[in-house]
């Protein structure tokens, strides 16, 4: 048989181990793993790691912008960054686009906005908000094929913008969980205590505080732990499967571990920036490092690494949530947009930090970035290099340091806290269903082969 694509001589990460072998692709699927395959398109992966492409379970794309956020991240730039960064598919959050994805009509608006603009496969979260629990919004989103649902227990959204996202109150969370449980899908939760963090922020402002580290102090660890406990209690009551987003402290993960031991269907993720940055350096970095929950201290970072290695954290994600420069360029950190642009460095930074610096096995690396999250969110055909799976690959050049520059970024707004950092590995190429969407030789493709799933 003649195949469409053969990747030769790479160290291929299989679920059973990592071996130097060849991978053959036919009609977008992995057709064979072994030797002596014929193809007109052969990619020599000698000295490269061939990993399943990353499935980033937490990405914000802001298209459509609704006339309010039109200059934020769009599908072309966002999925170009994904391609250049080795992310072959991702779960897109139901905000910050306008309108937010909270109904059948709004998800169709989103699909139309992204038509023919994708270089990665995009799966969708549907939003749980107070205004869609009584009008059939959850059911419409389920019928439209969302992969999961998302809600905020922290304050979010702009009430002056019609159709913007909105955080849940306790009743909305309970009732939304009850409805989502009937779909069998997972509810992902941003867990922070809104009443306490909002008030602590107001007090800090009134006292004249303005540093990013002072912003961190207004979101102490217990304001993460308490809503995680509350969400778990509601999940016990409703039978809803839940996933705690971007956990920034080991104490939050411990709550998930205890709940799983009690039979609750709950998982959690952390973010690359919690594993990479610490509070003591963020004032020097500036507002590009502002996020919520905030970047915490070295103790928390070490604890998260330990829990990740122990398999207690499902996956690491980018929580890619960029904005325009003016929203970050504020003298007072409390006034700056809280979101980090990290999608393009999902794989290279994590490979360097986890595998090269801390000795993580290639098999665990692939499980964290691809296999575990696709299984959790019931994503079929993704997440592993095996016959019959989608031919989604990232080719990684190990021990190849480079310094990230702003001009390297594919984002619409070239803002990132990783700029200026030396990263010890490079993305050599990315393939989505057997199509090259990026290589160091050819750059980012203009063949928009990605699909909404």
Image: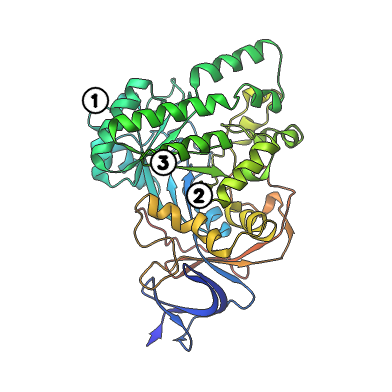
Judge whether residue 205 can be spotted in this image. Answer: yes
| Left or right of residue 138, residue 64 in this image | right
Q: Are there few (<14), some (14-19), or many (20+) residues within 10 Å of tag 3?
A: few
| Residue 89 picture location, percent across and down | 45, 56
Residue at (43% x, 48% y) in the render: 91
In three-dimensional space, the C-alpha distance between marks 1 and 3, rounded to whole angstroms, equals 34 Å
Q: Which mark is residue 315?
A: 2
Q: Are there few (<14), some (14-19), or many (20+) residues within 10 Å of tag 1?
A: few
| Residue 209 picture location, percent across and down | 71, 17
Q: Which mark is residue 261?
A: 3
Residue at (37% x, 49% y) in the render: 377
Residue at (65% x, 34% y) in the render: 296
First in sequence: mark 3 vs mark 2 = 3
- The residue that label 1 is drawn on is 134
Q: Does 241 sit above or below residue 428?
A: above
- 315 or 28, nearer to the observer: 315
């Amino acid at each position: 048989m003649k195949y469409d694509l053969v990747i030769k001589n790479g160290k291929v990460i299989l679920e059973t181990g990592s071996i130097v072998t060849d991978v053959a692709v036919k009609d977008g699927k992995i057709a064979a793993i072994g030797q002596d395959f014929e193809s007109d398109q052969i990619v020599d992966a000698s000295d490269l790691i061939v990993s399943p492409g990353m499935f980033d379970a937490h990405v914000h794309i802001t298209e459509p912008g609704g006339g309010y956020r039109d200059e934020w991240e769009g599908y072309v730039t966002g999925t170009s960054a994904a391609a250049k960064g080795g992310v072959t598919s991702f779960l897109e959050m139901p905000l910050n686009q306008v309108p937010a994805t909270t109904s059948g009509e709004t998800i169709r608006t989103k699909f139309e906005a992204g038509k023919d603009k994708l270089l990665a496969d995009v799966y969708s979260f549907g939003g749980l908000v107070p205004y869609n629990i009584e009008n059939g919004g959850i059911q419409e989103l389920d019928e439209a094929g969302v992969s999961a649902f998302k809600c905020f227990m922290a304050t979010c959204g702009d009430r002056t913008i019609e159709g913007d996202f909105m955080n849940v109150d306790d009743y909305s969370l309970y009732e939304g969980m009850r409805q989502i449980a009937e779909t069998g899908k997972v509810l992902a939760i941003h867990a922070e205590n809104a009443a306490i963090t909002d008030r602590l922020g107001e007090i800090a402002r009134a006292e004249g505080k303005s540093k990013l580290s002072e912003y961190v102090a207004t979101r102490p660890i217990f304001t993460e732990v308490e809503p995680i406990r509350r969400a778990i209690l509601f999940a016990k009551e409703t039978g809803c499967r839940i996933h705690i987003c971007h956990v920034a402290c080991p104490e939050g993960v411990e709550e998930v571990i205890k709940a799983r031991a009690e039979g609750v269907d709950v998982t959690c993720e952390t973010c690359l920036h919690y594993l990479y940055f610490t509070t003591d350096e963020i004032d020097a970095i500036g507002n590009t490092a502002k996020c919520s929950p905030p970047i915490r201290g070295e103790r928390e970072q070490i604890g998260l690494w330990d829990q990740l290695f122990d398999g207690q954290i499902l996956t690491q994600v980018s929580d890619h949530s960029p904005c325009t420069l003016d929203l970050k360029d504020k003298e007072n950190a409390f006034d700056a947009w809280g979101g980090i642009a990290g999608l393009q460095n999902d794989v290279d930074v994590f490979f360097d930090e986890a595998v090269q610096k801390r000795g993580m096995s290639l098999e665990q690396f692939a499980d964290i970035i691809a296999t575990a999250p696709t299984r959790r969110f019931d994503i079929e055909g993704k997440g592993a290099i095996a016959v019959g799976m989608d031919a989604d690959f990232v080719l990684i050049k190990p021990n190849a340091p480079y310094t990230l520059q702003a001009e390297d970024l594919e984002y619409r707004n070239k803002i990132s806290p990783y700029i200026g950092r030396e990263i010890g590995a490079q993305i050599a190429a990315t393939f989505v269903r057997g199509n090259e969407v990026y290589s160091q030789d050819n750059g980012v493709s203009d063949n928009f082969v990605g699909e909404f799933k």
